[in-house]
Amino acid sequence: MKPHWLAIFASLLSVSCSSYQREFKASTNEFHSVEKLKPAPTGPWKGTWKSEVNGHHGPLWCMITRDGSTPDTYNFRYRAGWGLLQFGDYTHPITTTLEDGALSLNHSMALPNNFGTYRVKGQVSPTQFECRFQGNGDKGTMILQRPN
């Protein structure tokens, strides 16, 4: 019975991953077609996260979009990995202002599935995404760059 549940979990994970990856690729293609016209911190980002508590680290993807219904709100849609696993796919809405082409971040949110509270502090410019995170007994850094 256990292998059956494992197969279901793996297939659900791969479907979730492929949906995010498909949307990330579309975001990357759109970014490369318009970025030269209007540099902005919105769009796709790819990099890593690293824990200062236990040394764990992994890949991190983020798509930043402006929320059209709420002024000064940006949606940060994340997906992270650790080892062979990819997890996440949650959106963190952040209310901030665009100043000198960059977004200043100092915000927290409750993570889905009772995983605690996540806090992010840093800055995202059109070319640089460096932030500190803290939550659920962990803290560390996120460093992302634009995907090719």
Image (spheres, rainbow, N blue to C red):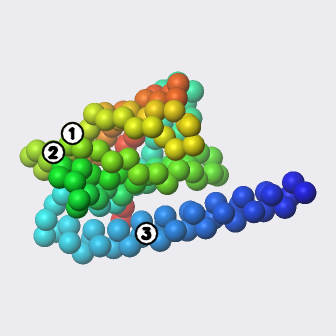
Can the viewer see residue 4 in this picture? yes
- The crowd level at tag 3 (other Cα within 10 Å; few <14, some 14-19, many 20+) is some
The Cα–Cα distance between marks 3 and 1, rounded to whole angstroms, is 25 Å
Choose top left, top right, bottom left or bottom right for residue 46.
bottom left
Residue placed most toward the observer, 83 or 69: 69
Image marks 2 and 1: residues in contact by CB distance under 8 Å = yes
Residue identifier under label 3: 23
What is the number of the mark on residue 74? none
Q: Position of residue 108 (x, y in %)?
A: 36, 35
Name the quadrant of the N terminus: bottom right
- The crowd level at tag 1 (other Cα within 10 Å; few <14, some 14-19, many 20+) is some
Above or below, 72 relative to 19: above
Sequence-wise, which precedes: disc 3 or disc 1?
A: 3
**Image point (29%, 44%), residue name:** 94
The Cα–Cα distance between marks 2 and 3, rounded to whole angstroms, is 25 Å
Which marked residue is nearer to the observer: mark 2 or mark 3?
2
Residue identifier under label 2: 97
Above or below, 70 relative to 141: below
Residue identifier under label 1: 104
Can the viewer see residue 45 in this picture? no
